[in-house]
Amino acid sequence: MKNNKLSHLSLEELQTKRKNLQNITLGFGIVILIAFAILLFLSVKSKNPVLIAAGVGSLITLLPSFINLGQINNEIKSRSSK
């Protein structure tokens, strides 16, 4: 089974990693939401509903970041409860 890399990091490193990942996810999320809004506008304007599906599909690219962020948060919680 794959070793958990998060268990080898110190609490300070985990908090730094969480902060960096939150900032990256927030920035990338804003860019994707702006692109989604543009695709939605173009879809309505050109009456081409395929663009809406492309916009919704692009939102799924944030899922790995949220999963990783959840794992980091769980590791921080488990260490702070000890």
Image (spheres, rainbow, N blue to C red):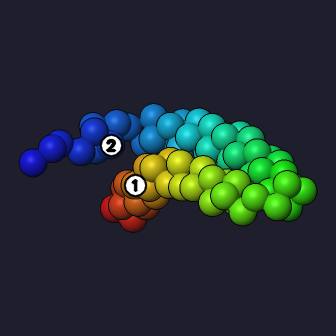
Instruction: Please give the label number shown on residue 6.
Output: 2
- Label 2 Cα neighbours within 10 Å, binned few <14 / some 14-19 / many ≥20: some
Q: How many C-alpha atoms fall within 10 Å of the one at disc 1: few (<14), some, or many (≥20)?
A: some
According to the picture, the residue beneath numbered tag 1 turns out to be 71
* Position above or below: 16 against 64: above
Q: From the top left corner, tell me how far across and down residue 17 is, in percent.
A: 50, 37
Q: Secondary structure at mark 1?
A: helix
Q: Mark 2 is on which residue type? A: Leu
Distance (Cα) linking label 1 and label 2 = 8 Å
- Judging depth in this view, the residue of 51 and 30 nearest the camera is 51
| Helix, strand or loop under label 2 | helix
Q: Is residue 21 left or right of residue 26?
A: left
Residue name at image x 85 percent, y 54 percent = 46
Query: Badges 1 and 2: C-beta atoms under 8 Å apart?
Result: yes
Q: Is residue 55 left or right of residue 47?
A: left
* Vertical placement of residue 52 versus 64, above or below: below
